[in-house]
Amino acid sequence: QVQLVESGGGLVQAGGSLRLSCAASGDIGSIFNMGWYRQGPGKQRELVARITNSGTTNYADSVKGRFTISRDNAKNTVYLEMNSLRPEDTAVYYCIVATTWGAGWGQGTQVTVSS
């Protein structure tokens, strides 16, 4: 079973930046797609960005041009660089990693953007 440990959330002013990390460990096998979802207050969980094992990325329209997803396959880690943050980006951010044995979710990390 895959274990995922997230880090990098916090409180930031609008216009600021944060970088989230999610490291996978345990019985991984091979890692395929990696991604980030978020769930804001009173909202459903939504896809923010994902990256395939070949490096193809896609983003939610709301974050295009501001967020960048990347991965380090040697470290089994996925990153989310978030720039020009807005109050509406406030949410709990979850990473998801698809492995040979199934998908696993991170525990979530809170991102709060103040206006």
Image (tube, rainbow, N blue to C red):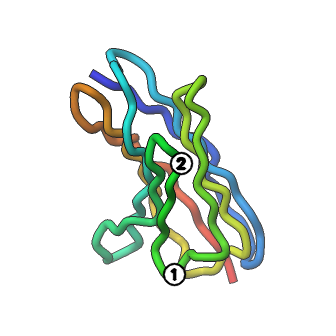
Task: Choose between 95 and 98: the one closer to the eye.
Answer: 98
Residue count near mark 2 (Cα–Cα under 10 Å), binned few <14, some 14–19, many ≥20: few
Q: In the image shown, does 3 or 101 lie closer to the viewer?
A: 101
- Residue 15, compared with residue 19, is above or below; it is below
Disc 2 is placed on an element classified as: loop
Q: Amino acid type of disc 1?
A: Ser
For the N terminus, the image quarter is top left
Q: Amino acid at mark 2?
A: Gly
Q: Is residue 110 above or below residue 12?
A: above
In the image, residue 85 sits, relative to residue 74, either above or below, namely below
When asked about the image quadrant of residue 96, the answer is top left
* Residue 104 marker: none
x 72%, y 68%: residue: 83
Which label lies toward us, 2 or 1?
2
* Residue occupying the far top of the picture: 27
Q: Is residue 20 left or right of residue 44?
A: right
Q: Is residue 24 above or below residue 80?
A: above
Q: Whole-percent x and y of residue 70?
A: 60, 48
Q: Position of residue 48 (x, y in %)?
A: 45, 66
Residue holding disc 1 = 62
Q: Which mark is residue 55?
A: 2
Residue depicted at x 32% and y 15%: 27
What residue is rendered at 36% in x and 25% in y?
Answer: 30
Labels 2 and 1 touching (C-beta < 8 A):
no
Report whether 22 appears left or right of 83.
left
Crowding at dot 1, Cα within 10 Å, few <14 / some 14-19 / many 20+, comes out as few
Residue with the most extreme left position: 102
**Label 2, label 1: how many angstroms apart (C-alpha)?**
21 Å
Nearest the viewer among 18 and 28 is 28
Percent of width and height locating residue 23: 52, 31
